[in-house]
Every structure is written in C-alpha cells, then in structure tokens.
Image (cartoon, rainbow, N blue to C red):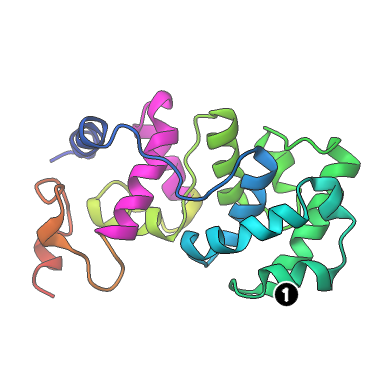
C-alpha cells in the first residue's frame, strides 16, 4: 500500500464516520482558547476544563490577566502540570497581547509564536480553530498516531506536520488534527492501544506488530 493510498483510506474513513470532530477544550472566544491551549501542554483537557471557568471569571479579558500578579494566577492554575511556568507565561502572554496586538489574538503563526508560552503546536491550534487556517498541529498524540498508521516517518513534530499537510487537502487539515488527536487519546493510546476497537487496522502499518505485544 502506498502512503497516498493509506492517507486516502484513513482520511476518507474519518470524513465519513466522524465529520464533526472538534476540540474538547471549553472556550467562548480566541483569548479563552489561547489560555486553555497554553494550560493544556502536558496536561489533560479534562483538567484544563476544570481550571478555566473560575480563571476566566476572575480574568475575563487579556487586559485583566495582564494586570494580574503571579500569586493571583497561580492560585487558579496550581492543579495543572508545571503551574509556576504556566502562570508566568499567561501573564507575560497577556501583557504582550495587550501592548503589541491591541488585545486581539493574531492569526499569523509567526506572530502567535512570539507570545510567551506559545510554541508551534499551540500557534497552529489557534490558527486552525479560530481562523480556519489550513495547518495541522502536531502534539504527542498526533505524532504517535501518524507514525503507527504509516502516515509519516518524520523524526520531529515539524517533519510530521509537513508530511500530513503534504498529503491532506487544505480544507480537511483543521478537522484532521482533531481526528488524529482524538484517535490517539481514546483508541491508539501510548501504552495499551485498543487495536480490537480500532476501525483503521486494515490500513495501519504497525497493526501486525502491535497485536503481538
């Protein structure tokens, strides 16, 4: 099976069976999504969704977050992973957002990546969800699933991102991120993949080896 055939089959299955996949993070506007994605690094969406409602009630705008102290923000985010760094990133991000971007979350990937706490994955998530940019964010789930299925052999997230964007049509890239991340979160898990429940085994490159482990 060629890589093109594998892509066509897998993306085709998702398009037919899970056409409305979306982020599991809860947010009402671009500012809230940006905060939530920063908090979600190496942390579950479930935990972030518990933390963000009181955080957004206390800091409903970038201006209010920019004026906050470390101790104030830390009190709300202390239950997520790396709370010290994330509290500092959130405050610094909000200050730059207010001072340089007028409080508006930018659509440009490079401008997004200038914000503290925002790497390429986070920038792609924002650009994709908020601005419908034809980009694919590669986190640990997407990286793992892309390799196991045989969609990419890239050794870095950026290399995997390039492989995925090379083979997935622009109009399907935004939703493809959600397809792959949700598949990795619930089916193609890191330690004990649920191959018996997977609808993609016919096209999965690693399936023969996975069922033997």
Judged left or right of residue 69, residue 213 is: left
For residue 141: magenta?
A: no
**Up-down relation of residue 27 to residue 154 (above or below):** above
In depth, the one of 17 and 115 nearer the eye is 17
The residue sitting at 83% across, 37% down in the picture is: 101
Residue where numbered disc 1 is placed: 84
For residue 161: magenta?
A: yes
Judged left or right of residue 18, residue 76 is: right
Work out which quarter of the rendered image holds the N terminus and state it: top left
In depth, the one of 166 and 47 nearer the eye is 47
Give the quadrant of residue 76: bottom right
Judged left or right of residue 119, residue 151 is: left
Q: What predominant SS class does the magenta segment belong to?
A: helix
**Up-down relation of residue 15 to residue 193 (above or below):** above
The residue sitting at 86% across, 61% down in the picture is: 68
**Up-down relation of residue 93 to residue 88 (above or below):** above
Stretch in magenta: 159-187
Measuring from the top left, give residue 119's x and y in whole percent: 64, 53
Measuring from the top left, give residue 107's x and y in whole percent: 67, 32
Measuring from the top left, give residue 209's x and y in whole percent: 13, 66
In depth, the one of 209 and 34 nearer the eye is 34
């Amino acid at each position: 099976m060629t890589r093109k055939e594998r892509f066509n089959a897998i993306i085709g299955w998702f398009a037919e069976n899970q056409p409305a996949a979306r982020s599991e993070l809860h947010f009402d506007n671009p500012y809230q999504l940006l905060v939530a994605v920063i908090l979600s690094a190496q942390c579950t969406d479930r935990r972030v969704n518990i933390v963000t409602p009181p955080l957004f009630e206390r800091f409903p705008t970038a201006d209010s977050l920019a004026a906050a102290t470390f101790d104030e923000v830390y009190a709300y985010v202390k239950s997520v992973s790396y709370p010290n760094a994330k509290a500092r990133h959130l405050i610094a991000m909000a200050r730059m957002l207010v001072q340089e971007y007028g409080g508006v979350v930018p659509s440009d990937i490079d401008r997004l990546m200038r914000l503290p706490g925002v790497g390429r994955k986070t920038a792609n998530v924002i650009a994709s969800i908020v601005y419908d940019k034809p980009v694919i964010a590669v986190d640990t789930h997407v990286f793992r699933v892309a390799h196991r299925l045989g969609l990419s052999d890239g050794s870095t997230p950026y290399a995997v991102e390039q492989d995925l964007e090379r083979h997935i049509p622009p109009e399907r890239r935004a939703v493809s991120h959600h397809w792959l991340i949700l598949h990795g979160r619930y089916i193609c898990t890191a330690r004990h993949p649920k191959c018996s429940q997977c609808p993609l085994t016919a096209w999965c490159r690693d399936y023969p080896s996975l069922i033997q482990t």
